[in-house]
Image (cartoon, grey):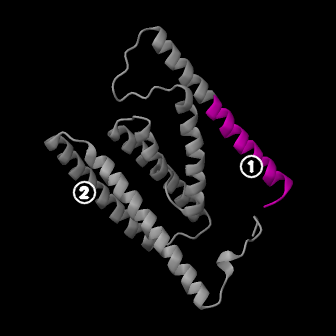
Amino acid sequence: CGGTLYWLLLLFSVAGMGGATTLIIRHLNSLHERKVAAGYSYLEDDVLWTGSRLLSLPVTCIFAGVAAGLLGIGGGMVTGPLMLELGMNPRVSSATAACMVLFTSSATTVQFIIVGMLRSDYAIWYGAVGIVATLVGQGFAGWYISKYNRQSIIILSLGGVLCASSGAMGLVGIMNVVADALRHNWSAFHINSLCD
């Protein structure tokens, strides 16, 4: 960490992601212009990729990625509400956010496996709980939507998970700071080197 090769790899990584984002923005803008020129009629839940919408999603995703890395949350938790704000169908927004969470959590799991920090008993337990909770939640949401023809359960579930997660993270953080203060351990307020 900290060597020339490290910073070059980081620079190329950021430049590559920036380049890919720019290409995707140009493609979406071109696609929108061609659809408008051809007289395409958008559906109610279609996202019109124009102006500020072309920039708001990538910028927010950058902040979501930073938050995911620093706070240990899935990036989909931040981008899910943004996609709803852009006017996406709640089912599409929920599925996209879930895909993002799957990708980030899978990448983190692989990192933990590589460095030998993954406890298999925890992985099996939490994996099984996650699978069962997903099946129950999907089953209930599907039943609710088909019976009442309302997709609000998806938005309410997303909001509830965000509120509960934020509250739990804040509570755990406060408890850790108070416990450190009682032990006169101020390491939480010490800024270390990037490579430590």
Residue 166 belongs to magenta span:
no
Q: Position of residue 2 (x, y in %)?
A: 81, 60
Q: Position of residue 169 (x, y in %)?
A: 48, 68
* Crowd rating for badge 2 (residues with CA inside 10 Å; few <14, some 14–19, many 20+): few
Q: Name the residue nearer the viewer: 31 or 105.
A: 31
Residue 11 belongs to magenta span:
yes
For the image, the number of numbered tags is: 2
Q: Which residue: 71% across, 44% down? A: 13
Residue type at mark 1 is: Leu
Range shown magenta: 1-22
Q: Earlier in the sequence, mark 1 or mark 2?
A: 1
The quadrant of the rendering that contains the C terminus is bottom right
Residue type at mark 2 is: Val
Residue 104's mark? none
Residue 136's mark? 2
The quadrant of the rendering that contains the N terminus is bottom right
In-image side of 33 versus 15 (left or right): left
Identify residue for label 1.
Answer: 10
Q: Which residue: 49% across, 55% down? A: 74
CA separation in Å, label 1 and label 2: 41 Å
Instruction: Indicate the quadrant where residue 29 lies.
Output: top right
Q: Position of residue 48 (x, y in %)?
A: 46, 25
Up the image or down, 24 lies above or below 114; here it is above
Q: Name the residue nearer the viewer: 129 or 146.
A: 146
Q: Which residue: 50% across, 19% down? A: 32
* Crowd rating for badge 1 (residues with CA inside 10 Å; few <14, some 14–19, many 20+): few
**Magenta region, main secondary structure:** helix
Up the image or down, 153 lies above or below 54; here it is below
Up the image or down, 44 lies above or below 164; here it is above
Up the image or down, 80 lies above or below 35; here it is below
